[in-house]
Image (cartoon, helix red, strand yellow):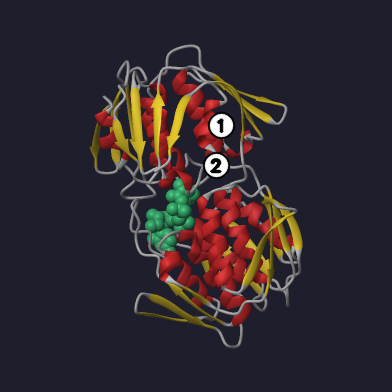
Amino acid sequence: MDRFIIRGGRPLHGDITIGGAKNAALKLLVAGLLTSERLILSNVPRIDDIATMRDLLTQHGMTVEAVNGDDSTLCISGTITNTEAPYDIVSKMRASILVLGPLLARCGKARVSLPGGCAIGTRPVDMHLRGLEALGAEITLENGYINASAPNGLTGDRIALPFASVGATENLMMAATLAKGRTEILNAAREPEMADLAACLNAMGAQITGAGTGHIIIDGVEALHGAEHHIMADRIECGTYACAAAITGGDLRLIGGQAEHLGAVIRTLEEAGVEVSEEDNALRVRRTGPLRGVDIMTEPYPGFPTDMQAQFMTLLSVAEGASMLTETIFENRFMHVPELVRMGARINVHGSSAIIRGVKLLSGAPVMATDLRASFSLILAGLAAQGETTLSRVYHLDRGYEAVERKLAACGAQIERIRE
Ligand SMILES: CC(=O)N[C@H]1[C@@H](OP(=O)(O)OP(=O)(O)OC[C@H]2O[C@@H](n3ccc(=O)[nH]c3=O)[C@H](O)[C@@H]2O)O[C@H](CO)[C@@H](O)[C@@H]1O
Ligand SMILES: C=C(OP(=O)(O)O)C(=O)O
């Protein structure tokens, strides 16, 4: 298990290139199941979750190959020979549940392991299942697996989601592309990744309108064909490096970062005393004055993203005054708190809210990553802290961030990966 050693106290200066979005790329790879032709995706991030998704698609019978030896462009092709998604892969990566809708739509059946809970919460999939049932699927749960069948194909319906679930919207949108007639998803998730997925599906011949709004309309077609699609920039990676500039009192240009996808994050940074400006194809983030405490509540897009909560917790740990951070999406997404406290942060958790009283300085310590975004919150703490921080269980980070140590070191951070 690799570790990072970070020596803090250096402001970061320079350029960081933002990669393709993990939370778009994983679903776009799954879209390859919807056609017998070639789907070519560019701007694919080089992260462990993509490798896991390649394994999942390969065991379904698909071929996933780097184009011209460059694994940031992947070609998905082939025929589905196996409609089962096994526990060992689904339990490793929750996005695996997204194969359910496409397999059902293409093959009329699927057997997918229930993902179960994970470190950040219970994360049920009932809305995915109810939605697919509304499209005509028969679903039973047995031995930890979802058995789904639709021998006569799926049929469009009006589905009102009780909560704007990202995963359920994606699963239903993909399944509905090949259903008979019209499907409407009401209270659909509005995250920018919805519009990116719909743009790719439409390039494959789907007829989807309204993606990115709460009302998505999908007119089913007979078949989808091949296409090429460039994956959107990762708004969470961009927001994370913005926090690195902010916490170190640095000045970073985040190349490819898209301000339009980061409205709530930018507003919060500005409220906290951080300067954010748009430059040619970049977002510039710098801080010269003190950080000020702010109150934050995580919400579905366009609200403040849960995937930025841990990074802001660290930032607010060294801000003047008190802040309150409320997590409304996941019930157990504060696991970074005890680790931050070990580095000198003053944080009290009361149910789904954390009260943070800013301290002048954090101090380096051995800490442990508990999940993907929590890992980076501890790197941020290490970059700002006095002395040395050792971060263990870096495999959580490698799931979703590409070349962290290279990107940070190029801007002046002292960070080293110890391979073990
Ligand atoms: C709305 C939201 O912020 N979603 C986040 C969620 O997407 P992800 O797709 O994983 O989760 P959902 O958006 O589906 O879930 C949001 C909430 O709805 C609940 N739920 C979901 C599906 C279901 O069938 N039943 C149910 O009760 C979940 O437990 C959770 O409390 O995690 C991703 C990884 O951190 C983030 O990138 C997404 O931004
Ligand atoms: C928790 C995350 O991802 P996943 O849904 O894959 O667990 C994340 O992107 O922050």
Percent coordinates x, y for residue 391 in the rendering: 36, 35
User: How far apart are the two marked residues, 2 and 1, measured between alpha carbons?
Assistant: 9 Å
- Tally of numbered tags: 2
Q: Based on the displayed image, in which of its 4 quarters is residue 234 positioned?
A: top right
Quarter of the rendering occupied by the C terminus: top left
Q: Is 413 situated above or below 121? A: above
Mark 2, residue position = 402
Instruction: Say whether residue 15 is left or right of residue 371.
Output: right
**How far from the left and from the top, in percent, is residue 269?**
49, 26
Judged from this view, the residue extending furthest toward the top is: 289
| Picture quadrant where residue 88 is located | bottom left
Residue at 54% over, 61% down:
53
Camera-nearest residue between 57 and 145: 57
For the residues labelled 2 and 1, say whether their Cβ atoms are less than 8 Å apart.
yes
The answer to which of marks 2 and 1 sits earlier in the sequence is 2
Residue named by callout 1: 407
* Frontmost residue, 86 versus 139: 86
